[in-house]
Image: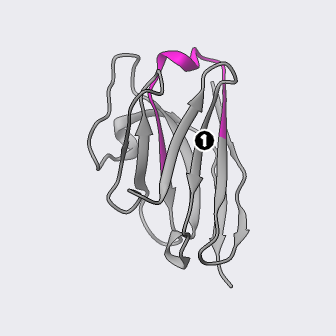
């Protein structure tokens, strides 16, 4: 089982970035997926999640209206579109698979322990 995030980099305040997370080794379409971020010296923070079909999403309050999660089950990939980025969005972003095929996420706050396998992250730096 492997999850690999990519697409991070340096972006100016107000800019946009699209992250990808490629999954392998499990039936991707059977699991909800989530995104988390971890800023230097801070705990992981839930960003949002998407249902297995991609038909529904939920976001942390800090991500609502700025971030959009989508997925392509044919490509075993989940995406995180980030807009209006601010320096406080600087963090390592990583994706995680749902705890089980039956797990459904609809809230605005989860911990990494609420999810299953997580992948290597990608660093996003927002700075001028």
Q: Which residue is mark 1?
A: 79
- Horizontal and vertical percent for residue 48? 42, 46
* Residue 128 x %, y %: 68, 85
Instruction: Tell whether position 17 is magenta.
Output: no
Is residue 58 toward the left or the right of residue 6 in the image? left
Q: Position of residue 63 (x, y in %)?
A: 41, 58
- The one nearer the camera, 31 or 43, is 31
How many residues crowd around disc 1 within 10 Å: few (fewer than 14), some, or many (20 or more)? many
Quadrant housing the N terminus? top right
State the residue at coordinates (61%, 21%).
Answer: 73
Residue at the image position 63 percent from the left and 50 percent from the top: 121
Residue 27 covered by magenta stretch: yes
Relative horizontal placement of residue 57, taking residue 33 as reference (left or right): left
Residue at 64% x, 70% y is 15
Where does residue 74 sit, x and y in percent of width and height?
67, 18
Which image quadrant is residue 60 in?
Answer: bottom left
Q: Secondary structure at mark 1?
A: strand
Task: Spot the residue most to the bottom.
Answer: 128
Image color mode: one colour
Relative horizontal placement of residue 67, taking residue 115 as reference (left or right): right
Which residues are drawn in magenta?
Answer: 21-36
Vertical placement of residue 64 versus 30, above or below = below
Q: Tell me: residue 58, above or below residue 1.
A: below
| Residue lying at 29% horizontally and 50% vertically, measured from the top left | 109
Reply above or below: 94 against 128.
above
Q: Is residue 70 left or right of residue 1?
A: left
Q: How many marks?
A: 1
């Amino acid at each position: 089982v492997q999850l690999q995030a990519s697409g991070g980099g340096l972006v100016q305040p107000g800019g946009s970035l699209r992250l990808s997370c490629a999954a392998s080794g499990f039936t991707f379409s059977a699991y909800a997926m989530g995104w988390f971020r971890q800023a230097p010296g801070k705990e992981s923070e839930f960003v949002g999640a998407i249902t297995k079909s991609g038909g529904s999403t939920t976001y942390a309050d800090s991500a609502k209206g700025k971030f959009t999660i989508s997925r392509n089950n044919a490509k075993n990939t989940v995406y995180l579109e980030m807009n209006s980025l601010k320096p406080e969005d600087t963090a390592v972003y990583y994706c995680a698979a749902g705890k089980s095929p039956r797990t459904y996420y609809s809230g605005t706050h989860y911990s990494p322990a609420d999810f299953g396998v997580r992948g290597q992250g990608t660093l996003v730096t927002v700075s001028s």
